[in-house]
């Protein structure tokens, strides 16, 4: 390795929810990471699990960074680019903390499960007790470590709760293969058997979905 | 005093570069290989014998796995990373190809060939026409396509004993060749880097080419393409073609930044009509300089042949209009790159290719780089672009199991 080679990310400083996602992906699988940022997850999946992992990212600076690391990342976004992939091209399609920011979350989920056998989705939970409490007590939009941008500036145009997401999966006929609620650092929280408790105490939800049948 | 001397010097320079100079293109010896096994062109005509002039840099490893083919653009040539024998200037891609550069000649064996139809040693309209008349082909030279250029390069690879290219890279028309390589010989191309290019030549681009060609036709010295008979060259027509094309390589921002509306004195003793005004805009002077230097190194009939080859290019047309079919099942790893201010090969055209590759299930990276330098940005100092090229190649080397690369 020459001194010019970039230092590659390793799991220990990966954002914790990415580590959780990585733990749900089988070795050697084909993965598309939507909103992959600088490619931390796809690099990790390639290095440690031999996955054929690719990424889409909307921020050009991040794309440049990822490609300069040697990662297969293309500029694009979830709303417009997924339609260009063939059916069942991937084993997993990952959407980490991005669902709440896309224009058409329902259509994006549909595309994810068309091009991939499984969809791995994480999103910040708007049902968390602190969010509820702030809205209830102050009557103003909540400002928490997770929801930390004022309403007029936030890219998170489609906030939802863990129960909302269960309801959408139900409506669309998606099977929730596994799910968990985690705190903001990505630590698992102990309420995963109880959606209502998870919806109150989980700062983010993480779901693995597949099509029914 | 000093200012006056500088002005006088500038006037001399402009005079030297006046467009009516008519020295014919120097005949130089270029390193080359002659193929006598024939080349069947897409138009159906067979070239019984043809020459491919090429340059190489770096060393081919023992396993022959580190070859990188660079494809040049319309007015480029094989002198990619060394002093040009005619202009005396550095290689056209010195910033990208060389020791320690993104395409590192200490790691890779880099090959660049003058395209078929060119005028720097490969067979083209200046080459002798078969039949023993001793005359050049001129406008009788068969119409060439991008695929024909790639066929000639493939013969060169066979000659060099390279069964698989680690990478094929090129910008603009070079990018068209990269796409054609990846479509025609997918198993020979491990990584492909089509830069600032398109899968077909747009109507607007064909229109600009046509203006250039008409400028050449309108030059009385062109003599229906038989200008060798007088020893003159259609310098004015070719220079105007170059000036017109050069505008398309830049951007409004770049022209404003470099020249704005600044004026300078016009050369008094030139026959240019512009001197009626006594002064000229700097941008005019710049374009005239571009035109006049170009005619010293490029052949007018070659310009006609190659612009036509670009115009014909439409990769999807071979697949009933579905570009994805050109790449179906490909294992090649792609990097598409475009530049924000490039209006000749805008980002939308690279995105079209990227999406077609997605439909074909290919491994694609795609980056648009911010730059105000227009289409020319791919040739210039663009650090982000160069970092991405280097990183992409490093990633590919990892996947190819290429040691020392």
Image: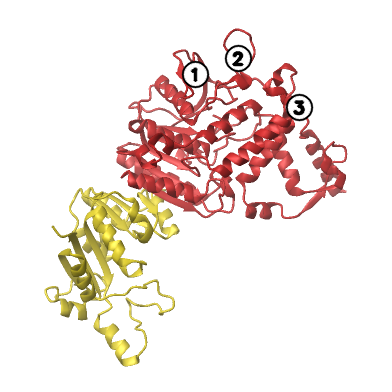
Chain colours: A yellow, B red
- Residue plotted at (50% across, 44% down): B196
Q: Position of residue B375 (x, y in %)?
A: 57, 46
Both labels 3 and 1 in a single chain: yes
**Above/below status of A104 relative to B340:** below
Q: Nearer the viewer, mark 2 or mark 3?
A: 3
Residue B157: give x, y in percent of width and height. Answer: 41, 24
Q: Chain of mark 1?
A: B
SS category of the residue bearing label 2 = loop
Q: Residue at x 67, y 41 (%)?
A: B244
Q: Quadrant of residue B95?
A: top right
Q: CA distance from mark 1 to mark 2?
A: 16 Å
Relative side of B239 to B276, left or right: left
Is B253 placed left or right of A133 in the picture? right
Disc 2 crowd rating (10 Å Cα; few below 14, some 14-19, many 20+) is some
To which quarter of the image does residue B400 belong? Answer: top left
Q: Which residue corresponds to mark 2?
A: B128
Find residue B45 and name its label: 1
Residue at numbered disc 3: B220
Q: Which mark is residue B325?
A: none
């Amino acid at each position: 390795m020459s001194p010019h080679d970039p230092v590659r990310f390793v799991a220990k400083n990966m954002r914790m929810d990415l580590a959780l996602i990585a733990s749900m992906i089988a070795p050697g699988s084909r993965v598309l990471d939507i909103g992959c940022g600088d490619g931390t997850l796809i690099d990790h999946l390639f290095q440690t699990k031999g996955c054929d992992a690719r990424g889409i990212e909307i921020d050009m600076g991040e794309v440049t960074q990822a490609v300069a690391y040697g990662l297969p990342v293309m500029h694009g976004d979830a709303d417009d680019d997924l339609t260009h992939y063939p059916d069942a091209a991937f084993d997993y399609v990952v959407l980490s903390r991005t669902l709440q920011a896309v224009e058409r979350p329902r259509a994006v989920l549909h595309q994810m499960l068309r091009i991939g056998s499984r969809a791995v989705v994480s999103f910040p939970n708007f049902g968390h007790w602190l969010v509820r409490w702030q809205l209830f007590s102050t009557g103003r939009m909540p400002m928490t470590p997770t929801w930390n941008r004022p309403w007029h500036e936030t890219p998170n145009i489609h906030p939802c709760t863990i129960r909302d997401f269960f309801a959408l999966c139900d409506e669309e006929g998606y099977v929730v293969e596994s799910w968990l609620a985690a705190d903001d650092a990505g630590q698992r929280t102990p309420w995963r058997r109880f959606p209502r408790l998870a919806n109150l105490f989980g700062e983010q939800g993480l779901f693995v979905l597949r099509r029914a049948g | 005093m000093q200012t006056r001397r500088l002005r006088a010097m500038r006037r001399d320079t402009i005079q030297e570069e006046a467009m009516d100079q008519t020295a014919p293109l120097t005949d130089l010896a270029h390193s080359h290989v002659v193929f006598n096994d024939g080349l069947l062109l897409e138009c159906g005509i067979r070239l019984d014998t043809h020459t491919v002039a090429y340059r190489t840099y770096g060393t081919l490893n023992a396993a022959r796995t580190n070859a990188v083919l660079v494809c040049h653009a319309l007015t480029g040539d094989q002198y990619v990373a060394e002093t040009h024998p005619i202009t005396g200037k550095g290689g056209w891609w010195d910033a990208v190809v060389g020791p320690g550069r993104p395409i590192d000649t200490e790691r890779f064996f880099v090959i660049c060939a003058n395209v078929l139809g060119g005028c720097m040693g490969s067979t083209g309209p200046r080459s002798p026409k078969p039949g023993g008349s001793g005359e050049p082909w001129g406008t009788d030279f068969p119409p060439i396509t991008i695929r024909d250029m790639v066929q000639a390069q493939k013969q060169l690879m066979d000659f060099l004993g390279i069964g698989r290219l680690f990478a094929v890279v090129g910008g603009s028309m070079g990018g068209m060749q990269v796409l054609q390589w990846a479509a025609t010989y997918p198993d020979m191309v491990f990584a492909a880097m089509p830069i600032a290019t398109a899968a077909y030549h747009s109507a607007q681009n064909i229109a600009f080419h046509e203006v250039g060609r008409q400028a050449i036709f309108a030059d009385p010295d062109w003599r229906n393409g038989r200008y060798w008979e007088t020893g003159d060259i259609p310098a004015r027509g070719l220079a105007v073609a170059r000036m017109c094309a050069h505008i398309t390589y830049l951007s409004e921002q770049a022209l404003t930044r470099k020249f704005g509306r600044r004026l300078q004195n016009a050369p008094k003793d030139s026959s240019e009509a512009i001197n009626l005004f006594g002064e000229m805009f700097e941008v005019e002077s710049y374009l005239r300089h571009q035109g006049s230097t170009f005619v010293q190194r490029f052949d007018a009939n070659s310009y006609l042949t190659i612009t036509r080859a670009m115009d014909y290019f439409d990769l999807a047309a071979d697949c009933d209009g579905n570009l994805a079919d050109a790449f179906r099942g490909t294992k090649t790893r792609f990097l598409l790159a475009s530049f924000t201010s490039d209006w000749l090969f805008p980002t939308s055209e690279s995105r079209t290719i990227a999406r077609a590759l997605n439909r074909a299930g290919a491994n694609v990276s795609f980056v648009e780089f911010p730059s105000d330098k227009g289409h020319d940005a791919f040739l210039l100092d663009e650090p982000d672009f160069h970092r991405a090229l280097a990183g992409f190649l490093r990633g590919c080397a990892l996947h190819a199991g290429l040691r020392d690369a």
